[in-house]
Amino acid sequence: QVQLVESGGGLVQAGGSLRLSCAASGRTISSYAMGWFRQAPGNEREFVAGISWSGSSTYYADSVKGRFTISRDNAKNMVYLQMNSLKPEDTAVYYCAVARVRAVRTGPDEYNYWGQGTQVTVSS
C-alpha cells in the first residue's frame, strides 16, 4: 500500500505560480511512473502531467504544456508540479497518483494509488 499526500494548493491570481508537492509513504515509488491529474466541478478527472520512474521522460496535457513542470525526487519519495502562468481555467482539485508501470501513462485507470487532492483556485 502507498499513501499519497498532496500539498501546496491555494488561491492565486491569474499569472501567478504555485508548486504542488506529493509525499508518498508506505512503499517506495521509485519503480513506478507518477502522474498529476485534476478535476474541476462538473468535469471528469483529467490528466495533467506524468513522469517516468527515473524522471527521464515527462508528458504533459496540451493545456498545460510550457507552463507546468513535473519532477520527482526518488530519494525523498516525492513528486512535484511547478505551475506557472496560471489561468482561471486551471482551477480544480489536483491529485497525484502512482502508475502501475514504469512508463508514463495518461489514463486514470492506469494508476492504482491516489492522494486526497489539493485545491487550486486561480482568480481572474
Image: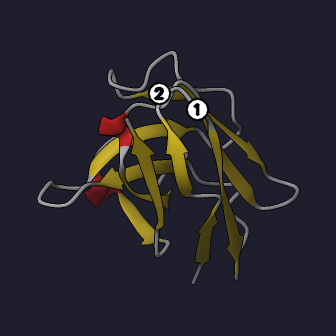
Residue at 80%, 52% in the rendered image: 74
Answer with left or right where residue 76 lies relative to residue 99.
right
Tally the numbered discs.
2
**Tag 2 near tag 1, CB within 8 Å:** no
Q: Is residue 99 above or below residue 123?
A: below
Work out which quarter of the rendered image holds the N terminus and state it.
bottom right
Residue bearing mark 2: 59
C-alpha span from label 2 to label 1:
22 Å
Q: Is residue 116 above or below residue 34?
A: below
Q: Secondary structure at mark 1?
A: loop
Q: Give the quadrant of residue 39.
A: bottom left
The mark that comes first in sequence, 2 or 1, is 1
Furthest toward the front, the residue is: 124
- Numbered circle sitting on residue 93: none
Percent of width and height locating residue 73: 80, 48
Q: Nearer the viewer, residue 30 or 68?
A: 68
Residue at 46%, 32% in the rendered image: 14
Q: Give the quadrant of residue 48.
A: top left
Tag in front: 2 or 1: 1
Work out which quarter of the rendered image holds the C terminus and state it.
top left
Percent of width and height locating residue 9: 57, 58
Q: Secondary structure at mark 2?
A: strand
Answer with left or right where residue 1 lies relative to residue 30.
left
- Numbered circle sitting on residue 16: 1
Dot 1 amino acid type: Gly
Dot 2 amino acid type: Tyr
